[in-house]
Image (cartoon, rainbow, N blue to C red):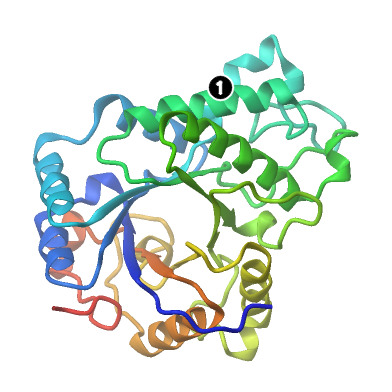
């Protein structure tokens, strides 16, 4: 178990690409935020949004904002549910074995893949290379994730020997291999999230895999050190014990107004709980995490029209 306290050196926000605004630009440049994460809206069609961003880039005004942020030292990271793009669903008609087997023993192209199929993994590697080359302003840090469902692991005979987390790591290792073909310094996150929240049991991370811990099942209205968050806190400890603290990122939900608005527009007015933020960051730092970031969606132009610029003091520290 890692007990040595390290300093958190990276701090970020993750927003939808359409929510990139001059307000966010000003807030980031006037603060301790040094990472801007780009997260196309999740759900079943998130891969289509990822493809559109990769093919078309950012609209002109938003592109200028991104360029300015990059010129001032802000790192751009893409946080993407991309598996349905990396392994195109239309391949199912000719290659059903590339795709997962469900609990009924049926192959289905709905989510993710068969983690034991080497040809599918090679396609995922190749697609990761292609996607990395297309995304503008990308850093060496990549977050190409599984599909956004609680658990869509494969139940075939080969994969049944692996846990959901094992399967996730097999896939992320394949993504990393593809990324390194086009960027020798590439690092790919293992997203400890939902069905893959526990550490893998049978698979080891390849060099360049780092932990990204997202406690989606936590109680958002109490700190992680509270009794109601015992499981989420334990999973954070177990994850960093397995992956180590090097590059480890906590991806939390302190600023996620999409969650607090029930993922419905118009957004609700947002109020940060600074005490929970402070205590959670202290907890992550005590475990050895080097980076913290938070979803900060539904705080774009439509939010400003309703409520004015969001007040984010308590997470964002002004210079």
Closest to the observer, 269 or 121: 121
Identified at 68% across, 11% down, the residue is: 93
Identified at 14% across, 40% down, the residue is: 63
Closest to the observer, 156 or 136: 136
Answer whether residue 185 is visible to the viewer in this image: yes
Q: Is 91 rendered above or below residue 292?
A: above
Q: Is 166 rendered above or below residue 226?
A: above
- The residue that mark 1 highlights is 88
| Left or right: 159, with 274 as reference point | right
Q: Is 140 rendered above or below residue 212?
A: above
Identified at 77% across, 38% down, the residue is: 154
Q: Quadrant of residue 257?
A: bottom left
Q: Secondary structure at mark 1?
A: loop
How packed mark 1 is, by other alpha carbons closer than 10 Å (few <14, some 14-19, many 20 or more), is: some
Answer whether residue 85 is visible to the viewer in this image: no
State which quarter of the image contains the N terminus.
bottom right
Residue 212 x %, y %: 52, 60
Residue 113 x %, y %: 68, 32
State which quarter of the image contains the C terminus.
bottom left
| Left or right: 311, with 133 as reference point | left
Q: Quadrant of residue 318?
A: bottom left
């Amino acid at each position: 178990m890692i007990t040595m306290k390290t300093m958190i050196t990276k701090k970020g926000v993750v927003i939808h690409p359409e929510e990139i605004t001059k307000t966010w630009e000003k807030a980031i440049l006037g603060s301790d935020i040094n990472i801007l994460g780009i997260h196309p809206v999740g759900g079943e069609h998130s891969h289509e949004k990822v493809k559109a961003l990769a093919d078309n880039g950012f609209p002109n005004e938003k592109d200028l904002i991104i360029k300015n942020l990059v010129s001032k030292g802000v790192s751009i990271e893409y946080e993407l549910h991309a598996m349905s793009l990396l392994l195109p669903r239309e391949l199912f008609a000719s290659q059903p074995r590339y795709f997962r087997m469900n609990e009924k023993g049926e192959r289905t192209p709905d989510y993710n893949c068969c983690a034991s199929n080497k040809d599918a993994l090679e396609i995922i590697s190749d697609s990761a290379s292609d996607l990395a080359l297309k995304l503008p302003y990308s850093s060496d840090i990549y977050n190409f994730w599984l599909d956004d469902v609680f658990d869509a692991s494969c139940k075939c005979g080969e994969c049944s020997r692996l846990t959901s987390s094992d399967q996730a790591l097999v896939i992320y290792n394949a993504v990393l291999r593809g990324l390194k073909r086009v960027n020798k310094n590439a690092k790919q996150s293992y997203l400890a999230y939902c069905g893959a929240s526990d550490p893998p049991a049978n698979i080891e991370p390849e060099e360049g895999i780092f932990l990204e811990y997202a406690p989606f099942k936590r109680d958002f209205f109490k700190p992680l050190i509270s009794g109601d968050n015992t499981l989420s806190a334990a999973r954070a400890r177990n994850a960093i014990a397995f992956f180590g603290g090097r590059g480890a990122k906590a991806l939390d939900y302190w600023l996620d107004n999409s969650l607090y608005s029930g993922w419905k527009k118009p957004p609700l007015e947002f109020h940060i709980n600074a005490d929970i933020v402070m205590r959670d960051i202290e907890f992550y730092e005590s475990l050895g995490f080097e980076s913290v970031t938070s979803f900060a969606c539904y705080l774009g132009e439509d939010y400003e029209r309703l409520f004015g610029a969001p007040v984010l003091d308590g997470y964002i520290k002004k210079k």
